[in-house]
Amino acid sequence: MKKTKEKEHYLKEIYKLEIDNKPISVSCLSNLLLVSKSSVSNMIKKLVNMNLLNSAPYKPIEFTEQGRELARTVVAKHRLIELFLVEVMGFDSENVHEIAEEIEHIESPEFFRKVQKMVNNRKIDPHGSPIPDVEF
């Protein structure tokens, strides 16, 4: 099954919940993403089938090792792009989220390595969040 922006968005949001030590459930994701519980359940099933998540009735949703690494990479790309847009391109930090949402899905390790170099391998995005240390 192919990765999509929507799947990566779910993984990114689950990663943020995990970092904040919040329980990850269908209800929680439904409220966070403003979608129905059935939509969340369907996506969770797809991500389980892709070996990115583990899920069982009445248990919190958890990452597989592969899923956590993919989620960390998407979060790192997003935060790195936000930093690049602010520091290199001069965007206001309040106006970079939507642009980063689009660029984070690009499959070009070389691009992200160059962006990382252009921001001097800094580890904090313009909003004060850590950029996960990943290999692009």
Image (cartoon, rainbow, N blue to C red):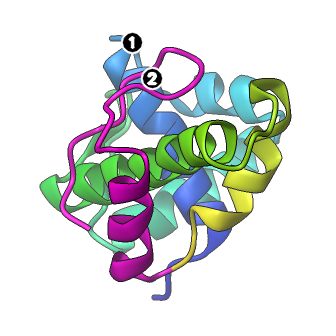
Answer with left or right where residue 61 lies relative to residue 51: right
Please tell me which residue is depicted at 70% across the width and 54% down the height of the picture.
Answer: 101
Q: Quadrant of the C terminus?
A: bottom left
Q: Which mark is residue 73?
A: none
| In-front residue for pair 43/85 | 85
- Part of the protein shown in magenta: 107-136
Answer with left or right where residue 126 lies relative to residue 134: right
Classify residue 124 by image quadrant.
Answer: top left
Q: Is residue 86 above or below residue 136?
A: above
Classify residue 109 by image quadrant.
Answer: bottom left
* Badge 1 element: loop
| In-front residue for pair 58/39 | 39
Could you tell me residue 4's position as x and y percent?
A: 60, 75
Few, some or many residues within 10 Å of mark 1 (<14, 14–19, 20+): few
| In-front residue for pair 18/78 | 78
Please tell me which residue is depicted at 59% across the width and 60% down the height of the picture.
Answer: 43
Residue type at numbered disc 1: Asp
The residue that disc 2 covers is 17
Q: Quadrant of the N terminus?
A: bottom left
* Badge 2 element: helix
The residue that disc 1 covers is 20
Classify residue 13 by image quadrant.
Answer: top right
| In-front residue for pair 16/104 | 104
Please tell me which residue is depicted at 41% across the width and 12% down the height of the picture.
Answer: 22
In reply to whether residue 115 is colored magenta, the answer given is yes
Residue type at numbered disc 2: Leu
